[in-house]
Image (tube, rainbow, N blue to C red):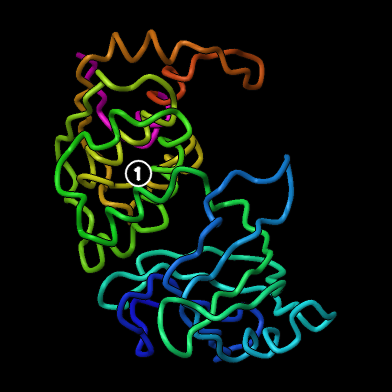
Amino acid sequence: MLGSARSVEGQKYALSSDEHDNDFWGHAHEARGLFTPLPGKEGARRVLLEGCSPEGGLLESVHHGGGWRARAGNADLALLDHDGATIGSYFVGEVTVVDVQPSARGAGLVDVTVTLWCDDALPGSERAWGLVRRGGLNRTGMWHELAAEERRAWVSVALRSHGYQRQEETDAPAGQVFVLDGRHIVDEDSFYCAIGEAVNGPGGYFGRNLDALDDCLCGGWGATAPFTLRWDSSAEARARLGEGVPGGDREATVFELLVEVLEERGVNVILR
């Protein structure tokens, strides 16, 4: 879904049922608590849907807050830009209403506290989503100063916003030369930040693990093999990606596996 006819000014989120077609649950200005660390290894998040206009199944659950019918079910939580277009979304499970209060956001709006399950909403994602929403991904290197947790979140947002950011764009033609800056590659997540940017520009996505990188190299994610990847400052990156990874009957480093995946798909990797 790339747009919502029901968008309301200032509202950043839209909820709809994942179980029943055409069951729209309404908008919210904020979803506070969505990107907080999970309470323990596993657990439901407590999220405040601020300035919410409940509809459909969510409205029914609001009327039964605290009771057994307060569970609305599974939903799609879409993040919206200023025009109401969807920039990305998360599956959220077992959405259950626990409290409802009048909202200071406007007449007729409420603040709905829910519990829900969502392992994919990584802590540290807010900054990246804010940049996508404002069209602020306008220069390279914006991820360089991020902490390790935030780099993983950056790649996750790049994946989920890929369709919105590229929209009608097609893959670059085969034979292109992409330049990968290795100076800021300090771990595997930062490699994916760097190669996503090299191929698709600021905030771009081109894999988040070895399997996803392999999938991207098959086409449809911004580049079509064969192409050339000029990896500058590769010696620095090789040293930082020198951790051994067991695989089958051999052990290779992360750096070696990345180069192997690239070359097996027809990428000419030039290490500089």
Query: Which percent across, then down, holds residue 196?
Result: 30, 41
In-image side of 40 versus 76 (left or right): right
Res. 230 image quadrant:
top left
| Dot 1 amino acid type | Phe
Q: Please report the residue visible at 37 percent of the width from the left and 23 percent of the height from the top.
A: 259
Query: Which percent across, then down, holds residue 35?
Result: 52, 51
* Residue 157 sits above or below residue 13 on the image: above
In-image side of 70 versus 77 (left or right): right
Give the number of marks: 1
Q: Please report the residue visible at 45 percent of the width from the left and 66 percent of the height from the top.
A: 30
Magenta stretch: give its range. Answer: 260-272
Nearer to the camera, 187 or 173: 187
Res. 37 image quadrant:
top right
Nearer to the camera, 111 or 90: 111
Disc 1 designates what residue? 206
Res. 195 image quadrant:
top left
